[in-house]
Image (cartoon, grey):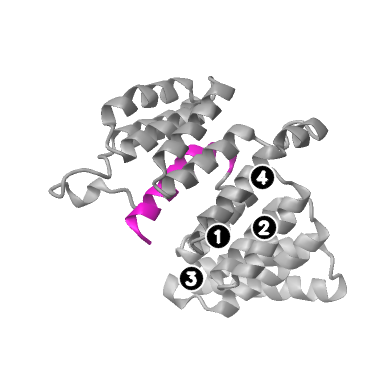
Amino acid sequence: MSKTRDRWIVQVILVLAVVAFVGVSLIPILGALNNSPSPAQTNADKNQPPSNQSLKLEDEVRGYELVLQREPDNQTALKGLLQARLQILSQKPRGEVKPADIQAVIEPLEKLVQINPEQSDYGVLLAQAKQQLGDKEGAAQAYRSILAIKPGDLKALQGMVNLQLSEKRPEAAIGLLQETLSTATQANTLQPGSVDIVAVQVLLGSVYGFQKNYSKAASVYDRAIQKDAKDFRPVLAKAMLLKEQGQVDEAKPLFDNASALAPAQYRDEINKAAALPTPTASPTASPESTPNQ
């Protein structure tokens, strides 16, 4: 992944995590593929030898599969099977994860999506898994299915935008976000709060920033700031955009304002972002100066 893409991802995660763009639903697959334990793994499991954990999980999988043979729509069994298979996935080094391992996760996910079409977390996780398998059209269809029901679903929007950018289709990502904004007022009239307009504007600005179309990005952020002067997200996004361009002095008051406006739990991250060396630092800067996660 390029440094430019890394910086964009850091920006989106920091600015939009507050609106659950990177939600808990994304963690199991991503954590498993990075050899991290599933969030639901218990302390007791962690204290067991790996061989004992694997045997226990395989037993759980077989038990859930037996239940599902009798009751295919048993959601408790489907969720348990999904969690057990995710934990099995999490125990494998990244290089040893096989397509069949991810396909095993997709099977209960597809059933859960079918039974619970209104619960977008399942659909987002399904899209992530399909994308990991290289099934980009399947991933896109999963995101489209969510957005057909919930046009303002932030996790699905962010996932679809990431997918389109990975396919070098930034204009498609921009079109999706502009369409979401054009229908947001009507959507919020029908269902108040269904589209977080400021969050979508910040994501749109981030796509323009990814294209290095800084003037359009700044314009979108300014409109978001005008819409809600007390929302720290567009302020922070504009601060990061200015810093990306090496305009540190102009960015500093915006970082300070964003920190003052933000809930306490985000201030440390904002201050860290403000203190990071700029991407345009001199070639003599230390290797640690470029964020890579």
Image side of residue 112 versus residue 93, left or right: right
User: In the figure, 202 relative to 71: above or below?
Assistant: above
Residue 176 place in picture, x, y as percent? 63, 50
The amino acid beneath tag 3 is Pro
Whichever of callouts 2 and 3 sits on the residue coming sooner in the sequence is: 3
Q: Can residue 225 be seen in this view?
A: yes
**Residue that appears at 20% across and 43% down:** 281
Residue 258 place in picture, x, y as percent? 44, 25
The amino acid beneath tag 2 is Tyr
The label on residue 143 is: 2
Do the residues under discs 4 and 1 have CB atoms within 8 angstroms?
no
Q: What stretch is highlighted in magenta?
A: 1-20
Q: Is residue 265 visible?
A: no
**Inter-mark Cα distance, 3 to 4:** 49 Å
Whichever of callouts 4 and 1 sits on the residue coming sooner in the sequence is: 1
Do the residues under discs 2 and 4 have CB atoms within 8 angstroms?
no
The label on residue 29 is: none
Image side of residue 201 versus residue 50, left or right: right
The amino acid beneath tag 1 is Leu
Do the residues under discs 2 and 1 have CB atoms within 8 angstroms?
yes
Helix, strand or loop under label 4? helix
Residue picked out by circle 1: 163
Image side of residue 131 versus residue 208, left or right: right
Helix, strand or loop under label 2? helix
**Inter-mark Cα distance, 2 to 3:** 35 Å
Res 152 → quadrant: top right
Whichever of callouts 3 and 4 sits on the residue coming sooner in the sequence is: 3
